[in-house]
Image (cartoon, rainbow, N blue to C red):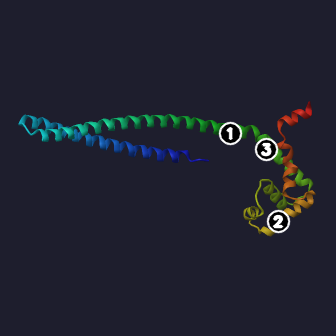
Amino acid sequence: MMDYNGLQDASDTDDIREKRRVIVLGALFIAISALAGVDLVTDMSEGVSVTHFVLEGGAFAAGIVGLVFMAGAWRRLSAKSDALQVENAELGLALEATAEEANRWRGEARNLIEGLSAAIDSQFDRWELSDAEKEVAMLLLKGLSHKEIASIRDTTDATTRQQARAVYKKAGLSGRNDLSAFFLEDLLVPMTSKADETA
């Protein structure tokens, strides 16, 4: 499952960094505009040259333009942050709904799963499997490889293979696929096929 909280934390950190950068640059442009504006007013009363006036006026205008640009960037970041918060809330609700659905399904299927497990165990008894063979057979049904079964049961791969062959022989089956099909084939029939059979 995706670690959504980790992704959200990374996104929050990026947003915070971006907002800090905009604040610092905005403060810098405010300072440039303020200093240039104060100097411009002071110079006007002292009667400076036109070139000096134009240069300081340009610095003041650049500060104002930068400030306007940073204000726009702040608005975009705020809108993005708001949109991400809405998306985060929606994803959280979807995740909760999925978890509730999974819990509901497990609850509804619990009796069926327990019944299937008991039926499989009864069939193992009819085949007269030993406890070790039952365990190997159940793990084979779960799709584990011989090597994985050997690791779980702390036995050798050769022992697991020998026990699997004993299961197949006692059950009169040719291998793992037949073992799975024996128990699961009727579970995987589409509902429409079953409805057609009864009609």
- The answer to which of 32 and 161 lies nearer the viewer is 32
- The answer to which of 66 and 175 lies nearer the viewer is 66
Residue at horizontal 40%, vertical 44%?
A: 16
Distance CA(mark 1)–CA(mark 2): 36 Å
**Eyeballing the image, is 147 above or below 26?**
below
Residue on which disc 3 sits = 113
Residue type, mark 3 in image? Ile
Horizontal side, residue 85 vs residue 198: left or right:
left
**Eyeballing the image, is 20 above or below 82?**
below
Residue type, mark 2 in image? Arg
Q: Residue 105: image x %, image y %?
A: 72, 38
**Eyeballing the image, is 172 above or below 111?**
below
Snapshot quadrant of residue 138: bottom right
Which dot marks residue 52? none
Distance CA(mark 3)–CA(mark 2): 27 Å
Disc 1 on helix, strand or loop? helix
Snapshot quadrant of residue 100: top right
Disc 2 on helix, strand or loop? helix
Residue on which disc 2 sits = 161
Horizontal side, residue 104 vs residue 24: left or right:
right
Residue at horizontal 6%, vertical 36%?
A: 47
Distance CA(mark 1)–CA(mark 3): 14 Å
Q: Nearer the viewer, mark 1 or mark 2?
A: 2
In primary-sequence order, the first of circles 1 and 2 is 1
In primary-sequence order, the first of circles 3 and 2 is 3
Are the residues at dot 3 and dot 2 in contact (C-beta closer than 8 Å)?
no
Residue type, mark 1 in image? Asn
Residue on which disc 1 sits = 103
Q: Residue 188: image x %, image y %?
A: 82, 43
